[in-house]
Image (cartoon, rainbow, N blue to C red):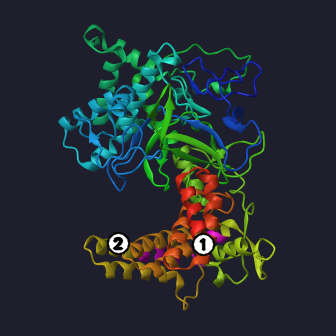
Amino acid sequence: MASICCIPTIDCAECSTNGDNRYSCQYSPSGNNFKMGVKTGPHGLHAVATEDIPAGAVIVQCLPLAQSPIIHGPAKPTCFRCFFQEGDDDLSGRRKKETLFRCSRCQIARYCSKECQLSDWNEGHKLECQFYVKQRKMQHISASGEEAAMPKALMLRVFAALKLSRDKQSVAETPMIKDVGVVKCGPMHFSSLAVSPQHHSPSESVKVLNSVEMRLIKSIMMKHAIGKGKDNDTSLDEQTVAAVQIWGYDKSDDHKHNRTNDEEKPKEKLFTLDQALLRTDDAFRKNNFGILDALHSSIGEGVYPCAALLNHSCAPNAILSYKLDSGVVGKGEAFHPPLLQIVACRDIAKGEELTHSYVDLMLSTKERQTRLLKTHGFTCECKRCAEGEFVVLLPQDRTLWGKWPLEHRLRVIDQGERNGEENNVERVDLETALNQCSLGERDRAAILDCMELLLGKANQSMLSDDVEEELDCLRTVVNLWEDEDIDWWWTPFNLPLYSVRSQYFTALLANQKIEEAVDQLEFIVSTLIIAFSHVQNHPLLGLQLFTLGDLYACMRRGRKAYLTYLYAKELMTVTHGVDHPMVIQLDHKIAEQVN
């Protein structure tokens, strides 16, 4: 089996040990020094550690094949290439844009600079722009309609990037940033992304292919495949073949990674364009990545074939972060697309499989299994899914569970592991701690229905600026679990309650009710400590601790602020990196509390 990715294949004597750059893979610096290799196993290709990796180490950095920001919603206007957000300073402190300018043609894409606009035009926006302009002419498109069209537009960006990569004769023609261990996958690697054996049912296939967006995409792709000005000299069949060749699919793709070295390679047969588009649509749903900012908020979507080599685990040893910054290119500095970093969230031994989570780790085992089967087509068999594999320390008296995890951890930081030990505690299975409930299914559903009604009322109150009614509704929902007169038990770390507390906390903070907000955030942080106890270091917990420390400081609870900042720094040094601006801010805040 030949190496199919820029990451080394390490279990085959005939395979490359330095990655495969026959397909224009690009590395920075030249060659690679990645801590990750590729092996084959019962579930196909997977990534493994090629050396011992300490927590916080960046395993590999990946540039996207294509990327697309969220157009509307809570996210600020974002540069379509580098994801610089309107009104922010970049990490170098050199650049600040109060207003990003729009593409004059589609009026949708925004840019922070002419350099980003020019680069993005060649890398993908030239086709995406046509799509948005023609779509607007064909039918009235609302803001929500533009957002819904994003995945289809991203498909065109990938197609443009694949053609651009194939058209280049030398990797030297595309400058790479000089950060250590950066890879940009070549054009052949997108076609190796995992898909389901049956991508779509016949009825789903017809619906996808006959949609207005997909018909428009096919037309744009076929014309771009054969080059500007040549469409009048070529038949539709020739345009179709050219488009399929750019995608790089052949009929042997689904089986080539399962063949032995002695098996004869099947004669290649090109997909039809419809088959290529259906396969790409499925690959997007299973392999694309949501791009997050430093606050762990979703700001876009990206295609990173290299990172897609990591399999899922509900007890992952790696997390994904995104570097939105400038980088050195050739002799100058430029702003690159979002750089995905695979980071070790705990110490990893050489030879251990590298994994990250595809789903929310706060979900119950049943919910995680259901989602994974629906979206990715497999049943998870990781250690966490085997009941009893992970335990947490909690008081024997369940009525003390609520804020105990945070209080206990701060005591340990303050007094040390030995002096922070407590009596009357027990080891509780993680799934029990997160999901235990004494109610039957019917009673549980009744409480959740009541919760939904109150949340709906709270949202209506928010829209009508009735602050007191909104807060009263949210307070009532929280009290469903806290009423001392109830005769049933539902763990205080359950996901529905966590979600309500988060909404309640946001509303309290927005209305300057700091003391009540702190009370809710202490419960939220305690829930996260339990939910992510098996991950060791999770960015969301670190960020919430940062916020809690700020609120403690605002309330002049100096000692608590100091200990909480220390806890936040312990986590964020791993998840964000020691040189990240937020970690540097934590250093200053810790010093202020000491003084």
- Residue 435 shows in the view: no
Please provide percent x and percent y for residue 368.
Answer: 58, 56
Placement of 568 over or under 77, stated as above or below:
below
Amino acid carrying mark 1 in the image: Asn
Kindly identify the amino acid type of the residue bearing the numbered disc 2.
Answer: Gly
Question: Is residue 223 shown left or right of residue 434?
Answer: left
- Report crowding for label 2: few under 14, some 14 to 19, many 20 or more residues within 10 A (C-alpha): some
Q: Is residue 429 visible?
A: yes
Q: Nearer the viewer, mark 1 or mark 2?
A: 1
Residue pushed farthest bottom? 485
The image position of residue 153, as x and y in percent, is 35, 36
Which element carries disc 1, helix, strand or loop?
loop
- Say which residue appears at 62% left-offset and 69% top-offset: 434
Query: How many dots with numbers?
Result: 2
Q: Main secondary structure of the magenta part?
A: helix
Q: Which residues are magenta?
A: 433-452
Q: Nearer the viewer, residue 214 or 180?
A: 180
Q: Position of residue 136 (x, y in %)?
A: 21, 38
Instruction: Specify the farthest residue to the top.
Output: 233
Which numbered disc, 1 or 2, marks the residue that appears first in the sequence?
2
Residue placed most toward the observer, 392 or 123: 123
User: To which residue does mark 2 refer?
Assistant: 456
Q: Check the picture and name the quadrant holding the N terminus.
A: top right
Q: For residue 238: magenta?
A: no
Image coords of residue 197 (percent x, y): 55, 34
Q: Is residue 137 above or below residue 481?
A: above
- The answer to whether 182 appears left or right of 299 in the picture is right
Mark 1 sits on what residue?
595
Find the distance from the CA under tag 1 to the CA under tag 2. Answer: 46 Å
Q: Secondary structure at mark 2?
A: helix
